[in-house]
Image (cartoon, grey):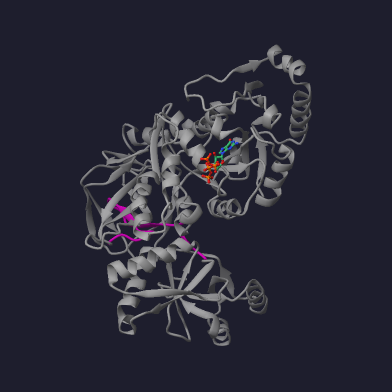
């Protein structure tokens, strides 16, 4: 069998940049996020990856942070804690010859549109599945977002040290529910108390499991050839089952294909136990060997307003470019400073460089960008495609904004997502409606929440994908705009952006459905459905109207 571990570093071609310095740096980058349902083991795996990567010395660092968050119901306290979560939301460390950027996808109470947007800034994802529970709701949602860009996914089936489900059944569920083919790379031998280890299908080795949170540098025992056969005597049932199942898997032709993985069609699957450090090294190795370095991204070039050609921007082009995918507001009302999380897409960042912003046409100097390490932030000295830098600003930057050194452009693939939760803001002091509208408009532009203006009503509607977004907006309205508002649930199930090639038909639709229509911050028409049935009926009745569940930032439909 050819060795797929040997693949992939040369995929980024040295060109354009005289000495190939940028191309070499890009080839070293791996930028990924971990997706999972709460409690599957994301925090544990994050911590173990950092431990193996040498970024933290001791287990418990990330976990302690997780449990300290939300330990209090006092909002300001929560926000203080979030100061820490800023630092932990991007973690850079080196492993082997690679520079790894691990982006946190906020989960639990932190779940918000940011969770989705983070996935637009990564080149790969690690999906953690609890072996006892299989595919769960939040994983389904997050994988749908990965699908938008065909992001390659590595699967880690966790908690094999427990009594879990039959591995074949779990793989079947991943294939049928998530519509992605599975290529097992390791296969479990037993489970729970009788978890012996995993068989590596590509290397023909057995990695022996030893329970306990041993240190990251401790070697895993590896069995080869006749040593593997000896397992037949010590744990016959588990061994035979593994042999039968791997034969079945091989017979089904589910072998790993790098190309299919890179297209997001197939996922290599690893079994392990995060808490016991088992299987973590294999995930890191798969990231190094198989996960793609930053790839070319599609952009529209030219000034704002111009129709603009689209072209692929290569990560090793000398022109520095990138986009904002997340904004973290500082809750101190006296300092409206914010950190914009910026994904570099091409060129090289150097402190003090001057960049242009296509949306406003303005020039800005990026002097004090920060890089995020496991426990702290420090000044960024240089960054390349795949890296995430934090840019301090006072509200000039919005989600989706592109900064470039020379050629003006906009990146595609940074969408708004149809919200699932809706509220109306009710003022305690009716005289503050002007401030309320201003605040909501600005917070909407920044991406903290989505704001819709119904066609037949003048109360603004707010849409979010996570409850926390409402809490943040409520607090920021008070702190930054002096507006005391309460949010009341609106009886809306979901929203869809609507378009139609035929203007007369769209006008007819708008007249008939005006009670259910609104405009978003960019003036696009949005259909607000009371329930699922309502939406499917409208789609059936108006077949020429298109209903979209995402919309690109800055795009007028
Ligand atoms: P999350 O970030 O996806 O929400 O999950 P997290 O890592 O916090 O893990 C959820 C729970 O599952 C934790 O237990 C954690 O210790 C446990 N866990 C993670 N990986 C494994 C594993 O490989 N095997 C077993 N048996 N358990 C695992 P908890 O009781 O909620 O927290 P704690 O008291 O252990 O901190």
**Based on the displayed image, in which of its 4 quarters is residue 382 positioned?**
top left
Residue 179 visible in the snapshot: yes
- Give the residue displayed 70% in from the left and 42% down from the top: 170
Which percent across, then down, holds residue 492?
A: 55, 74
- Name of the residue lying farthest toward the top: 226
Q: Residue at x 33, y 72 (%)?
A: 439
Residue interval drawn in magenta: 396-418
Image label count:
0
- Whether residue 119 is situated above or below residue 259 in the rendered picture: below
Task: Determine whether 303 is above or below 5 in the image.
Answer: below
Q: Is residue 252 left or right of residue 497?
A: right
Q: Tell me if residue 306 can be seen.
A: no
Q: Quadrant of the N terminus?
A: top right
162 relative position to 302: left or right: right
Residue 163 position, x and y percent, is: 69, 36
Q: Nearer the viewer, residue 304 or 548?
A: 548
Pick the front one: 480 or 199: 480
At 28% across and 44% down in the image, what residue appears? Answer: 370
Is residue 3 magenta-colored? no
Question: Is the magenta region chiefly helix, strand or loop?
Answer: loop
Instruction: Name the quadrant containing residue 360.
Output: bottom left
Front residue of 103/546: it is 103
**Taking the image as four quarters, which one is ligand 1 found in?**
top right
Q: Position of residue 48 (x, y in %)?
A: 48, 33
Residue 408 located within the stretch drawn in magenta: yes
154 is higher (above) or lower (below) than 526: above
Q: Is residue 195 left or right of residue 92?
A: right
Question: Percent from the top left, x then y, of residue 538?
Answer: 63, 77
């Amino acid at each position: 069998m050819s060795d797929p571990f040997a693949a992939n570093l040369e995929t980024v071609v040295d060109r354009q940049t005289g000495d190939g310095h940028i191309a070499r740096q890009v080839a070293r980058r791996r930028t990924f996020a971990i997706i999972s349902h709460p409690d599957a083991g994301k925090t544990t795996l994050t911590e173990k990856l950092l431990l193996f990567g040498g970024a933290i010395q001791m287990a418990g660092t990330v976990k302690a942070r997780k449990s300290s968050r939300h330990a209090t119901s006092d909002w300001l306290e929560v926000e203080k804690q979030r100061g820490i979560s800023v630092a932990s939301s991007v973690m850079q460390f080196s492993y082997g010859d690679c520079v790894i950027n691990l982006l946190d996808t906020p989960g639990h109470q932190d779940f918000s549109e940011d969770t989705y947007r983070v996935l637009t800034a990564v080149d790969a994802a690690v999906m953690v599945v609890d072996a006892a529970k299989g595919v769960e709701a939040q994983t389904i949602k997050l994988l749908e977002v990965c699908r938008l860009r065909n992001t390659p996914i590595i699967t880690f089936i966790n908690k094999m040290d427990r009594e879990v489900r039959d591995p074949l059944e779990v793989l079947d569920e991943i294939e049928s529910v998530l519509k992605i083919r599975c290529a097992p790379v390791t296969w479990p031998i037993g489970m729970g108390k009788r978890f012996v280890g995993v068989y590596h299908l590509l290397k023909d080795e057995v990695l022996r499991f030893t329970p306990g949170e041993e240190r990251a540098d401790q070697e895993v025992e590896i069995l080869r050839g006749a040593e593997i056969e000896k397992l037949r005597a010590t744990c016959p049932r588990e061994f035979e089952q593994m042999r039968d199942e791997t034969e079945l898997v091989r017979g089904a032709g589910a072998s790993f294909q790098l190309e299919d993985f890179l297209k997001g069609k197939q996922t290599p699957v690893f079994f392990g136990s995060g808490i016991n450090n088992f299987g973590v090294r294999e995930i890191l190795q798969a990231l190094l060997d198989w996960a793609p370095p930053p790839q070319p991204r599609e952009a529209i070039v030219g000034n704002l307003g111009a129709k603009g050609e689209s072209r692929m921007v290569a990560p090793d082009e000398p022109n520095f470019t990138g986009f904002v995918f997340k904004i973290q507001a500082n809750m101190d009302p006296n300092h409206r400073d914010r950190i914009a999380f910026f994904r570099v897409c091409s060129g090289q960042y150097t402190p003090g460089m001057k960049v242009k912003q296509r949306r406003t046409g303005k020039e800005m100097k990026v002097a004090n960008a920060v890089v995020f390490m496991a426990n702290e932030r420090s000044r960024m000295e240089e960054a390349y495609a795949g890296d995430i830098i934090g840019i301090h600003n006072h509200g000039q930057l919005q989600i989706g904004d592109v900064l470039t050194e020379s050629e003006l452009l906009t990146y595609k693939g940074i969408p708004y997502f149809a919200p699932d939760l809706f509220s109306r803001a009710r003022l305690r002091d009716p005289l503050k409606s002007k401030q309320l509208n201003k605040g909501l408009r600005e917070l909407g532009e920044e991406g903290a929440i989505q704001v819709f203006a119904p066609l037949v009503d003048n109360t603004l509607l707010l849409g979010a994908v996570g409850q926390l977004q409402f809490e943040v907006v409520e607090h920021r309205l008070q702190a930054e705009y002096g507006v005391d508002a309460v949010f009341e649930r609106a009886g809306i199930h979901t929203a869809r952006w609507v378009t139609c090639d035929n203007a007369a038909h769209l006008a007819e639709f708008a007249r008939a459905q005006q009670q259910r229509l609104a405009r978003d911050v960019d003036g696009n028409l949005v259909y607000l459905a009371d329930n699922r049935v309502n939406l499917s009926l409208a789609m059936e009745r108006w077949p020429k109207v298109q209903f979209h569940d995402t919309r690109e930032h800055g795009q007028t439909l």
